[in-house]
Amino acid sequence: MPEPMGFFTDTTVCIGCKACEVACKEWNQLPATNGGVSTLSGDSYDNTRRLDGMHWRHVKFIEQFSAERTDGRWLLMSDVCKHCVRAGCMEVCPTGAIIRTEFDTVVIQSDVCNGCRDCIAACPFGVIGVNPVSGVAQKCTLCYDRLRGGLEPACSKACPTESIQFGTIADLKKKAAARVGQLHMNGERRAHLYGADDTMLGGLNSFFLLVDRPEVYGLPPDPKMPSRNLVPSSLWSVLGAISVGLLGLVSFRTRATRPAEVRDESRRVV
Amino acid sequence: MNPGVWSSTLFTGPPEWRWLIILYFFVGGLAGGSYFVAALIDLFGAREDRPLARLGYYVAFPAVALSGIFLTFDLGHPFRFWHMLVQSNTWRPMFKGYSPMSLGSWALLLFGIFAFLAFLGALADAGRLRAPWLRRVRPPGVIGGLVAIVGGLLGFFVAGYTGVLLTVTNRPIWADTTLLGLNFLVSAASTSAALLILLAGRRWRATAGVAALERFDAWVLILELVALIGLLVSLGSMLQAWLNAWGVLLVVGVVLVGILVPLLLLWKPRLMGPDLSATLGAFLILVGGFIFRVVVILSSDGIGRPM
């Protein structure tokens, strides 16, 4: 049985070259444009704009500049599916199309998915989208086919700065902890890991080193499982059903037990 | 968290569930609610109310069939609808007890079977089908009682699970409350009773059975108002997402047009005459129920990813 595999993305060394995006699209044969239509963001070098069914890697360009433009910095981050240990998408999928592989990664089987899109609503990171070519929900597979062939994923292979590192989760966590220590020693006290420990959805198999709050990078500070609402929501519904049932029973039972002459007088409504 | 960010649900992507899903939720609610109301009348109503109960069964089966069509055509691959019920690679049953969509798919199938049985039973009961033995699928009697009770429970499940399904996501508004299932269920009951009142028309309006149905609907409308207030409170800071045209539509279209005006018409039928009051009130309840689903679905779907 292979060890759990994943990505450690060190955002501090990302240069925004988008080699990961290109490599991902090439290997996975994803269309460059949506039916020939290329949508530009219009206010950023980031024209990929978001992760979805056609974009399984997305280099985010976060521009932090003061109003007078005298001070500022770029935060760059190559975003991807988090391959959560407790995956919301897999939890809700009604067809069993979303599976956990022998590498502990989460993969959508395109031939099983019927495009219900429940997984899109369930993913706390907004990773999944419908691919207009296949008509089904798609996302990063962590290059499952390459992993099966003993190769590393296309994006990490192409990354020129080793911002995206691939390996076993145990090794990646050691490297990540060392890198955070190094940054702290160099004075970058804001450096911290996002999703490396198991408190966040049991752990993210794609985790990140950030130097600002998660929401600055478009990441939820406290991602949750969709099932957190299942029991309370169901109980409220049951309570509603009982209440409506009782109202019905009172409304119609009264009528059934009244003498006929009283029934004819029961036309007043409220 | 940023002061401008209200919830972690704002980091997610919209599933683009739109008009077909709104229609599915509305018509599916009518199917489940009509069956439930018909079963209540059958089980607890007077014998002369049987034609009124038949109306409910006449609505339930075509409505559940229609809602299934809406749901299927909303899929990216409609011909793979059966993947919800059978694992396409192993041919084993596909069932996840913790996935509302999986549970709902099975409930829809089972409810469809019960709705079909009750539909045939109603036709036989009315003498429109020459199969007297089919009358046994309607109460009284053990088989009829079972069909009414199990079918009624399944009907209510179909009417309410859609709201639960929305809360079991990570989308803004939907996952920020646990009361959508309750609201959808109560709304399904009120709209279904309203539809039966409309269908009863002038011919049966003077009957005590329809009067009981109107009394029932009035109480359910009050419950609906309470549930809606509960929903708004439960949203907390996410209520800000409705401080716009959606909020106006909710207040005017659902609270005023769909609940308060019909309540007034039910309470004071002489305001516009009993016939017009009943017809207009029932119609407005249906309009309000539809608008409620439009607001809930589209207001969340319009909130995209932050970046």
Image: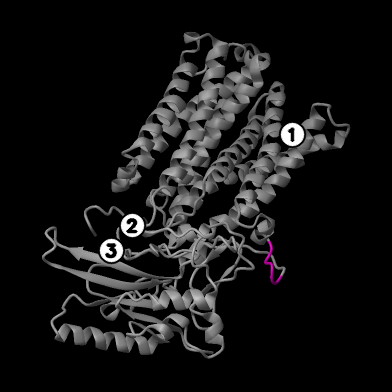
Q: Do callouts 1 and 3 mark residues in contact (Cβ within 8 Å)?
A: no
Inter-mark Cα distance, 1 to 3: 61 Å
Instruction: Give the residue pinned by disc 2.
Output: A42
Look at the magenta stretch and give its main secondary structure: loop
Does the rendering let one see residue B215? no
Question: Which stretch is magenta?
Answer: B86-90
- What residue appears at the point 55 percent right and 60 percent down from the top-left corner? A132
Residue B140 - label = 1
Coordinates of residue B34 in the picture (x, y in percent):
63, 34
Marked residue chain, label 2: A
User: What element does badge 3 sit on?
Assistant: helix
Q: Is residue B3 magenta?
A: no
Q: Same subunit under labels 1 and 2?
A: no
Q: Earlier in the sequence, mark 2 or mark 3?
A: 2
* Foreground: disc 1 or disc 3: 3
Amino acid type at circle 1 is: Pro
Quarter of the image with the N terminus of chain A is bottom right
User: What element does badge 2 sit on?
Assistant: loop
Q: Nearer the viewer, residue A184 or A131?
A: A131
Amino acid type at circle 2 is: Gly
Marked residue chain, label 3: A
Question: Which quadrant of the view contains residue A258?
Answer: top right
Q: Do callouts 1 and 2 mark residues in contact (Cβ within 8 Å)?
A: no
Instruction: Give the residue pinned by disc 3.
Output: A215
Coordinates of residue B67 in the picture (x, y in percent):
63, 43
- What residue appears at the point 27 percent right and 85 percent down from the top-left corner? A177
